[in-house]
């Protein structure tokens, strides 16, 4: 379609990029961007890194558009319902916005600490948006005696790294054996965990927080853990993964729950019976979809690159007669403890891993991941430039272990990748 009204619900990375691409593809109808945050769209990755460490500020994170979007922006108001028969989105302020096409881009939010009384203690934080980052940063500047990070996924690890950079003592607790194990596997996770500890991190694996203890003023003071320990902690960041913002879709007949809204590889939302819903798309962290390269069901890939890639696919499909599917390999990065971690493909689909370049003990390295004799993913640490080559291997379904002609290739030893259980439904967002 090139005319009519397209409503985009969720005005952050995926929503903004969809709007931008729609205009780039010649959509000259009416564009409505609904966002419940009061801010202009902004970039979230720096929140855990440069912002907490004091190298950037939350007023410097605006996401740029490549053109004048000529969009009606409804900011600070949430979409609260979807009426597919009437083709209307209901808003929190009572308005109803009709659409010819709808793009669901409402993302995800941090999973809260389950004990409400403890979550309400001053000093206990989540990290998803600007306000969260500003509050944590203020708490860090005040000089806590110890920071507790609950969850050793990507966000938790990055927060811990930023706090150590500030010279603060930090404890990370995680349920599994190694940090980031759901995305990187326990084998590579343990390698990174060892490097985190070498930076001075108090990393406690197979340990859960059983109580957050406050003082009479309602301030966090101490934490108790499953190993019976109790220690001082006056700032805590709860980093237990994320939950898709799909409540507003309840009752619309879609296949949507806390894991996301299911769509096909062309980003078209499907209903509870699996049929494509005409002119309704989902993009970014809120979407669950089957990547065409991997023979598997729908899953949420909560990464920056996925939001951008899906936005482009949805915008193309909304403006063209032919149809594209999202085919780019999943990829993400994380910066922490002086390590630039890059991932390509779907390592978590693997059951085997092999060190292909460098050394697990020190310095840069690359590990390739395989399943059933096929290379499905790769992770590099401080070797970003080699990743295109690994992406090509994954794309061509190269045999595993792959043949890598590099000067720093060690002897090949295939290891158990150490993923906790079968393929997980959510990557990067589902971290603990
Ligand atoms: C701290 C942090 C660090 C990260 N670091 C990395 C990284 O290093 N590498 C990487 O690849 N990815 C990283 N990510 C993930 C990346 O930022 C996300 O994948 C990306 O933000 C997804 O964009 P999105 O637009 O789909 O969702 P979101 O960014 O979640 O945006 C959704 C928007 O919709 C709004 N919304 C929600 N419900 C409603 C409603 N009912 N009505 C209207 N608006 C609504 C939300 O408030 C939000 O503004 C990080 C994320 C966080 C939080």
Image: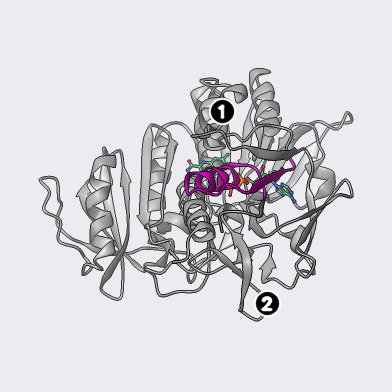
Residue 133 sits above or below residue 114 on the image: above
- Could you tell me residue 279's position as x and y percent? 62, 65
- Could you tell me residue 129's position as x and y percent? 66, 37
- Could you tell me residue 171's position as x and y percent? 57, 37
* Residue positioned 57% across, 32% down in the render: 47
Residue 190 sits above or below residue 279 on the image: above
Say whether disc 2 or disc 1 marks the residue closer to the N-terminus. Answer: 1
Tell me how far mark 2 sits from mark 1, CA to CA.
37 Å
Residue 405 sits above or below residue 334 on the image: below
Label placed on residue 61:
1
* Residue positioned 21% across, 70% down in the render: 399
* Local secondary structure at mark 2: loop
* Local secondary structure at mark 1: loop
Dividing the picture into quadrants, the one containing residue 135 is top right
- Could you tell me residue 134's position as x and y percent? 67, 26
Which sits in the foreground, 424 or 301?
301
Q: Residues within 10 Å of mark 1 (few under 14, many from 20)?
A: some
Does residue 363 appear left or right of residue 22 in this picture?
left
Q: Is mark 2 within 8 Å of ligand 1?
A: no
* Residue positioned 20% across, 49% down in the render: 357
Which sits in the foreground, 257 or 249?
249
Which span is picked out in magenta?
7-36
Does residue 117 appear left or right of residue 167 in this picture?
right
Ligand 1 quadrant? top right
Is residue 144 in sight in this rendering? no
Q: Is residue 426 magenta?
A: no
């Amino acid at each position: 379609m090139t005319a009519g009204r397209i409503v985009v619900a969720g005005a952050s990375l995926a929503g903004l990029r969809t709007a931008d691409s729609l205009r780039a593809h010649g959509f000259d109808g009416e564009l409505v961007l609904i966002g419940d945050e009061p801010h202009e769209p902004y970039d979230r990755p720096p929140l855990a890194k440069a912002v907490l460490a004091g190298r950037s500020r939350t007023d410097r994170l605006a996401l740029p558009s490549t053109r004048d979007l000529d969009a009606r922006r409804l900011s600070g108001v949430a979409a609260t319902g979807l009426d597919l028969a009437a083709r209307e989105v209901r808003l929190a302020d009572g308005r109803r916005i009709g659409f010819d096409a709808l793009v669901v881009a409402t993302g995800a939010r941090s999973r809260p600490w389950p004990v409400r009384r403890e979550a309400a203690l001053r000093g206990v934080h989540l990290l998803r948006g600007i306000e969260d980052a500003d509050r944590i940063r203020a708490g860090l500047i005040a000089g806590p005696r110890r920071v507790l990070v609950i969850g050793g996924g990507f966000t938790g690890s990055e927060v811990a790294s930023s706090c150590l950079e500030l010279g603060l003592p930090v404890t990370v607790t995680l349920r599994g054996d190694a940090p980031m194990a759901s995305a990187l596997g326990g084998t590579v996770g343990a390698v990174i965990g060892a490097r985190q500890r070498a930076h001075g991190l108090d990393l406690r694996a197979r340990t859960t927080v059983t109580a957050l203890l406050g003082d009479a003023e309602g301030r966090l003071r101490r934490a108790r853990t499953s190993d019976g320990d109790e220690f001082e902690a006056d700032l805590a960041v709860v980093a237990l993964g994320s939950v898709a913002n799909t409540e507003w879709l309840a009752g619309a007949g879609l296949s949507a729950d806390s894991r996301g809204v299911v769509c096909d590889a062309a980003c078209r939302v499907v209903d509870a019976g699996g049929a494509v819903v005409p002119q309704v798309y989902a993009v970014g962290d809120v979407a669950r979809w089957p990547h065409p390269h991997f023979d598997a069901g729908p899953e949420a890939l909560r990464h920056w690159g996925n939001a951008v890639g899906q936005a482009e696919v949805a915008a193309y499909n909304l403006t063209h007669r032919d149809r594209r599917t999202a085919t780019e390999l999943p990829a993400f990065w994380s910066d922490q403890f002086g390590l630039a971690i890059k991932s390509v493909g779907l390592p978590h689909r693997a059951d085997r891993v092999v060190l292909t370049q460098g050394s697990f003990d020190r310095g840069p390295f690359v590990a390739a991941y395989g399943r059933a004799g096929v290379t499905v993913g790769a992770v590099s640490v401080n070797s970003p430039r080699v990743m295109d080559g690994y992406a090509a291997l994954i794309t061509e379904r190269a045999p595993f272990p792959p043949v890598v002609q590099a000067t720093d290739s060690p002897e090949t030893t295939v290891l158990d990748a150490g993923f906790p259980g079968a393929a997980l439904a959510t990557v990067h967002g589902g971290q603990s």
